[in-house]
Image (cartoon, rainbow, N blue to C red):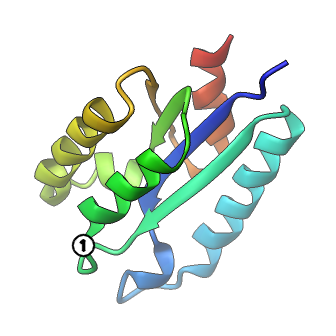
Amino acid sequence: MTVARVLVIGLDPAKIEGWDPEPVQAAIARGQARFGDHGIEADWCLVALDENPEGAVAEALTREDYVCVVIGGGIRKHEPLLEFFERVINLVRQHAPDAAIAFNSSPEDCADAALRWLR
């Protein structure tokens, strides 16, 4: 049996200035553990906006064959990042055209977002 593989794309909380990344990092760790609970292999692509994020996303998308790509709320919900969000969607379409695209509501429910498309 083939194990489903998911890619989660989000902002790297350690690279965002002006706030404490620890609560988000802890939520990400809990979210990563939930994938394991469901027997899903998950890779995480956490990007910094000032370090070629499109290149990092494209590289991550081509590393494996993903059945689903979860795009985090930090990218989707922050209006100044709308153009970046569009670029991420189009990178997924280009580099992982067969992958479902899912959206989480927090770092902890990434597995739930993927599971909606893996059933």
Image coordinates for residue 89, horizontal then vertical, percent: 26, 37
Q: Is residue 43 left or right of residue 84?
A: right
Image vertical order of residue 6 relative to residue 33, above or below? above
Q: Which residue is mark 1?
A: 52
Q: Is residue 49 above or below residue 39?
A: below
Nearest the camera: 62 or 74? 62
Q: Is residue 109 left or right of residue 67?
A: right
User: Crowding near pointer 1: few (<14 within 10 Å), some, many (20+)?
Assistant: few
- Horizontal side of 101 relative to 22 (left or right) equals left
Q: Residue at x 73, y 62 (%)?
A: 29
How many marks the image carries: the answer is 1
75 and 18: which one is in front? 75
* Residue 68 drawn at (x, y percent): 53, 29
Q: Position of residue 90 (x, y in %)?
A: 21, 37
- Residue extending farthest top: 119
| The quarter of the displayed image where residue 118 is located | top right
Name the one closer to the observer, 45 or 94: 94
> Does the rendering let one see residue 72?
no
The percent position of residue 11, horizontal first and vertical second, equals: 41, 64
Q: What's the residue type where badge 1 is placed?
A: Asn
Quadrant of the rendering where the N terminus is positioned: top right
Residue 93's image quarter?
top left
Q: Residue at x 70, y 69 (%)?
A: 26
